C-alpha cells in the first residue's frame, strides 16, 4: 500500500485499490454485539480473519457501517464472528467526539 491509497504489485506496478468483502448471514443480535455466519458453505469465499479487527461491516450496497470486527472463532476464518455494534448509546457518544453528526 502506498500513501495515496493505491497498492503496489509484486513487480512494482500500480494496482487499483479493491474493496474486499465476505458475504455474511446474521445469526443473532445482543445489546452490544452482532453474531454472523461468515461463510455458510465454507467453500472458497472465506471470511473475517486475523488482522481484520476494526474493519467495518457495511449495509449491503452502501458505505454505511453498522458494526466493526472484534472477534472471530475459526482458525480457517470460515466460522462465526462476534462484532461490536455501532448503534449503542456508549458507542454513539464516543463517535460524536469525532463526527458530531453521528
Image (tube, rainbow, N blue to C red):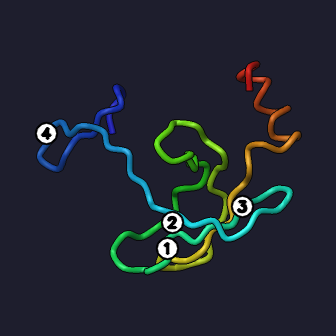
Instruction: Name the mark on residue 22.
Output: none
Instruction: Name the mark on residue 13.
Output: 4
Marked residue nearer the N-terminal end (3 or 4): 4
Q: How far from the left and from the top, in percent, is residue 16? A: 24, 37
Instruction: Name the mark on residue 34.
Output: 3
Numbered disc 1: secondary structure: loop
Residue at the image point whose x is 82% and y is 56% from the top: 32
Gap between marks 1 and 2, in whole Å?
5 Å
Which residue position holds label 1? 77
Marked residue nearer the N-terminal end (1 or 3): 3
Q: Are marks 1 and 2 in contact (CB under 8 Å)?
A: yes
| Circle 1 Cα neighbour tier, 10 Å, few/some/many (<14 / 14–19 / ≥20) | some
Residue at the image point whose x is 76% and y is 19% from the top: 100
Marked residue nearer the N-terminal end (4 or 2): 4
Asked where in the image residue 13 lies, by quadrant, the reply is: top left
Q: Are marks 3 and 4 in contact (CB under 8 Å)?
A: no
Q: How far from the left and from the top, in percent, is residue 60? A: 50, 47
- Quadrant in which the N terminus is drawn: top left
Numbered disc 2: secondary structure: loop
Amino acid at each position: 500500500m502506498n500513501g495515496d491509497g493505491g497498492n503496489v504489485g509484486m513487480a512494482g506496478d500500480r494496482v487499483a485499490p479493491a474493496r474486499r468483502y465476505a458475504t455474511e448471514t446474521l445469526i443473532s443480535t445482543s445489546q452490544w454485539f452482532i453474531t454472523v455466519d461468515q461463510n455458510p458453505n465454507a467453500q472458497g469465499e472465506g471470511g473475517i480473519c486475523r488482522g481484520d479487527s476494526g474493519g467495518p461491516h457495511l449495509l449491503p450496497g452502501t458505505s454505511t457501517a453498522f458494526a466493526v470486527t472484534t472477534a472471530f472463532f475459526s482458525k480457517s476464518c470460515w466460522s462465526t464472528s462476534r462484532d461490536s455494534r455501532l448503534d449503542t448509546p456508549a458507542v454513539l457518544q464516543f463517535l460524536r467526539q469525532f463526527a458530531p453528526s453521528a
